[in-house]
């Protein structure tokens, strides 16, 4: 075998797994090509020039001592980083391949073209450093990739440029930071058949939630055209989330989130030749308003991600592409996910804002942290001299050239990009708070302005005016004792549910539907059902914008509500998740988009048309049907049967019967498909008639705020009467004890959701003594309440033993 052929390895060959010669990226491609194809996962064919070939190229041109000398001058600060990098890249760019190596590259390219039955096959030429994409060394995109390379001359030029990219400024800084010796890091060049995603679509998927580290979901980003637009954060992609444990059930569709991205641009093939292989064009209106992937394609990719993760035994960062000519899906790259998969599972930090401020900008939150500082707005990384360490970087988007600046930032805010964009990935790796896809940060924020960047409020991230104080707490759960009394969580925000998956809670005792409707859906359900009759032109415009991509606007409500509930349920599966049906008051409903037309004006909404009384009434019945459809989608289509439905503010037995019948009319029949239905216990009538309510429902959840209000006749929102509002008042605790006894007679479970156990440890102890089955608290209070419950149970056991 000639020396040139020795430096060429096909991805289908066993030796392609040698990381020392192929680099992490190409070794992964080799392993995937051989193993994933056997599992039915298509990977485009290709070959690689080994790292030994790179060293042979340098030696044939006498470049090693010249490069070493320039790097030594840089180390001694005789020349600048920019000059050193430019000089080395120029040396490589003008060098020639040894004749045998050049012939071997051409021969391999001809063979690849022949396999594809095309002359001058279009290929992707990728760099793979021997220290890149390893578990302890993997920043996104340190070296170059060239797409739509055609012809032998352009291929050789692209290979040279990949070699030269080992000495891009950002790559030199990266190696210095990670203490790699420059002249001991080689580079392999991968040559892979292009998938015609310029005519189709492409994107990235992670086999772990990239924000929370929740290991049971797959996150897919998708955009039209070549995948570089997603990787570089150039577009705001569609985003899909899939729940892994239910993927094995063929009749289920465990997609738990679908967000339509704006996708305003796409990267497509340019002209022939190496100078302009790709170009960026505007997407069509139809493309912007359409989801890139159909559900069956989303699920196929997700199942592939599971197979790839199982093969590598770790969370993976995967690139995929869809060929626009054939409609086929391909996996084109896979590497270890290097941030969340290494995060310690037993401890976490919590960030809490301690003040309020004016919201300036909103986007997707990356991570969970909060940071304050002065804005530094930059257009390009060439402006690095303007950036002060600890500032808030604000820019349109980032790519690997921004790395030196990002490492010095306290937080990052971008106009564009999704959760798998460069800015998002690197921010997580650096432990920075970042908000991406704001759309207008560079227009609203200005250099020198003091702001607070908050990613601690769920899926949405906010930039506030001024420096707002915040608290950071460390939580550890290894030493928490098991308790007989279940300690569950109160949850409203779907993204927050995933964030708190590490808490050793026993489920979710109260999932508030109102948050999803008010903050994610934002539209009154009756305004969607009766959109043609909606009178408010402003509301019509807002609804048209929010429901873009939906022909039937009611489906927007059902999908968004179902996905929100599904994320909450998935975070605790298979533990119980109790979802309370909507409990807005009429004034709160009226504030939803289009809501004023469908709501009466009430003197006392707290005691008005709320809870169960709405569900069977003509004024809301069709809106309630959408809530029932969403619950059915979560339980029957997605498969999250751990969802329990709870009826709020059910005043009478007759109202209970009407509500249960209405639910059954809309496909939610108690007992069917293991559906349990609970009732809130928040009205004295619920306690007085507890045994009769227990005949109709599977459990009770005590709403201590309303029960206290209606027992003592005290407006819970009145500052003047605040001293009288006391959940520990004997009248209230007597009612709680009574309902627990009555419910237990009929073997019904009883929980309590509210902040009283968090605020008053003695109240938590009373609940344990009364025999409550579960206590549901906010995540930030979980640690404290769990320890109180454990202590109270120990005291009860000691007392019983003494008797």
Image: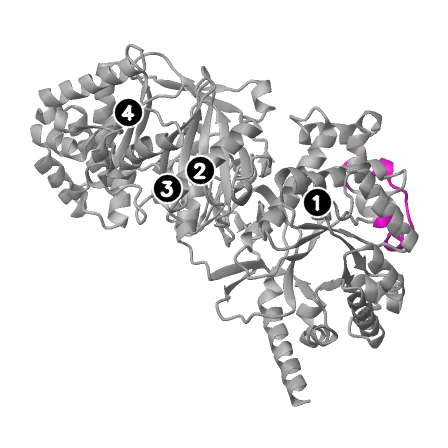
Q: Is residue 717 visible?
A: no
> Relative to residue 168, is residue 786 drawn left or right?
right
Q: Quadrant of residue 193?
A: top left
Q: Which mark is residue 523?
A: none
Q: Main secondary structure of the magenta part?
A: loop
Between 305 and 170, the one nearer to me in the picture? 305
Question: How far separated are the C-alphas under marks 4 and 2?
Answer: 21 Å
Q: Earlier in the sequence, mark 4 or mark 2?
A: 4
Q: Secondary structure at mark 4?
A: strand
Q: Which residue is mark 2?
A: 305
Residue 424 appears at what percent x and percent y?
A: 46, 42
Outermost residue, top direction?
119
Q: Earlier in the sequence, mark 1 or mark 3?
A: 3
Q: Residue at x 42, y 58 (%)?
A: 344
Question: How far separated are the C-alphas under marks 3 and 4?
Answer: 21 Å
Is 726 above or below relative to 365?
below
Q: Earlier in the sequence, mark 3 or mark 4?
A: 4
Question: How far separated are the C-alphas under marks 4 and 1?
Answer: 50 Å
Of tags 4 and 1, which is closer to the observer? Answer: 1
Q: Which residue is mark 4?
A: 46
First to last magenta residue range: 592-613
Q: Earlier in the sequence, mark 4 or mark 1?
A: 4
């Amino acid at each position: 075998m000639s020396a040139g052929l020795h430096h060429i390895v096909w991805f289908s060959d066993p030796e392609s797994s040698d990381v020392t010669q192929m680099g992490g990226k190409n070794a992964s491609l080799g392993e995937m090509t051989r193993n994933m194809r056997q599992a039915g996962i298509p990977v485009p064919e290709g070959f690689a020039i080994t790292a030994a070939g790179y060293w042979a190229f340098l030696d044939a041109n006498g470049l090693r001592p010249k490069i070493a000398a320039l790097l030594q001058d840089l180390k001694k600060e005789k020349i600048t980083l920019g000059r050193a990098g430019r000089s080395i890249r120029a040396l490589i760019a003008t060098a020639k391949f040894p004749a045998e190596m050049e012939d071997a590259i051409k021969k391999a390219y001809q063979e690849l073209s022949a396999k594809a039955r095309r002359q001058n096959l279009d290929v992707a030429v990728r760099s793979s450093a021997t220290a890149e994409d390893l578990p302890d060394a993997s920043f996104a995109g340190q070296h170059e990739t060239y797409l739509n390379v055609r012809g032998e001359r352009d291929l050789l030029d692209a290979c040279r440029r990949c070699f030269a990219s080992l000495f891009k400024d950002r790559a030199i800084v990266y190696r210095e930071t990670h203490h790699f010796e420059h002249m001991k890091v080689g580079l392999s060049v991968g040559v892979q058949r292009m998938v015609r995603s310029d005519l189709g679509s492409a994107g990235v998927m992670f086999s772990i939630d990239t924000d929370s580290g929740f290991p049971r979901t797959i996150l897919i980003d998708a955009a039209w055209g070549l995948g570089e637009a997603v990787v570089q954060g150039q577009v705001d992609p569609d985003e899909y989330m899939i729940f892994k444990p239910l993927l094995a059930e063929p009749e289920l569709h465990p997609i738990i989130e679908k967000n339509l991205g704006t996708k305003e641009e796409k990267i497509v093939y340019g002209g022939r030749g190496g100078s302009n292989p790709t170009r960026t064009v505007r997407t069509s209106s139809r493309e912007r308003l359409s989801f890139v992937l159909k559900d069956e394609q989303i699920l196929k990719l997700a199942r592939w991600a599971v197979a790839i993760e199982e093969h590598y035994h770790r969370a993976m960062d995967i690139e995929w592409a869809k060929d626009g000519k054939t409609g086929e899906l391909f996996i084109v790259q896979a590497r270890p996910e290097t941030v969340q998969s290494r995060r310690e599972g037993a401890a976490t930090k919590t960030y809490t804002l301690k003040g309020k401020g004016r919201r300036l900008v909103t986007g997707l939150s990356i991570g969970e942290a909060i940071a304050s500082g002065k804005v530094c707005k930059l257009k390009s990384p060439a402006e690095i001299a303007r950036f002060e360490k600890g500032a808030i970087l604000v820019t349109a988007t980032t790519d690997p050239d921004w790395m030196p600046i990002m490492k010095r930032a306290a937080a990052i805010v971008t106009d564009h990009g999704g959760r798998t964009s460069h800015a998002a990935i690197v921010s997580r790796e650096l432990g920075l708070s970042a908000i991406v896809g704001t759309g207008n940060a560079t227009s609203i924020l200005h250099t020198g302005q003091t702001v607070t960047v908050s990613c601690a409020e769920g899926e949405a991230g906010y930039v506030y005016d001024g420096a707002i104080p915040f608290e950071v707490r460390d939580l550890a759960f290894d030493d928490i004792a098991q308790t007989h009394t279940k300690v569950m969580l109160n949850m409203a925000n779907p993204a927050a549910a995933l964030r708190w998956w590490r808490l050793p809670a026993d489920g979710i005792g109260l999932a508030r539907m109102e948050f999803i409707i008010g903050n994610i859906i934002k539209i009154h359900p009756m305004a969607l059902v009766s959109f043609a009759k909606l009178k408010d032109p402003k509301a019509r415009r807002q609804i048209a914008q929010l429901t873009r991509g939906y022909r039937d606007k009611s489906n927007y409500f059902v999908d968004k509500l179902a996905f929100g509930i599904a994320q909450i349920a998935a975070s605790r599966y298979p533990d119980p998740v109790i979802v309370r049906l909507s409990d807005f008051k009429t004034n709160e409903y009226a504030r939803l988009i289009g809501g004023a037309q469908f709501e009466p004006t009430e003197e006392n909404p707290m005691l008005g048309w709320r809870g169960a009384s709405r569900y069977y009434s003509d004024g809301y019945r069709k809106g309630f049907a959408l809530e029932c459809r969403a619950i059915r989608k979560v339980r029957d289509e997605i498969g999250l049967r751990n969802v329990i439905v709870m009826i709020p503010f059910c005043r009478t037995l007759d109202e209970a019967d009407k509500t249960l019948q209405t639910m059954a009319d809309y496909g939610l029949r108690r007992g069917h498909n293991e559906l349990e239905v609970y009732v809130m216990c928040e009205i004295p009538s619920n306690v007085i008639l507890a045994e009769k309510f227990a005949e109709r429902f599977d459990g009770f959840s005590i709403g201590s705020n309303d029960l206290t209000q209606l027992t003592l006749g005290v407006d819970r929102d009145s500052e003047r009467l605040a001293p009288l509002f006391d959940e520990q008042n004997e009248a209230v605790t007597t009612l709680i004890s009574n309902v627990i006894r009555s419910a237990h007679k009929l073997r019904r479970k009883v929980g309590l959701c509210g902040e009283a156990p968090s605020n008053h440890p003695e109240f938590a102890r009373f609940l344990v003594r009364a025999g409550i089955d579960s206590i549901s608290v906010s995540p930030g209070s979980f640690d404290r309440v769990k320890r109180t419950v454990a202590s109270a149970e120990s005291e009860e056991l000691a007392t019983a033993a003494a008797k």
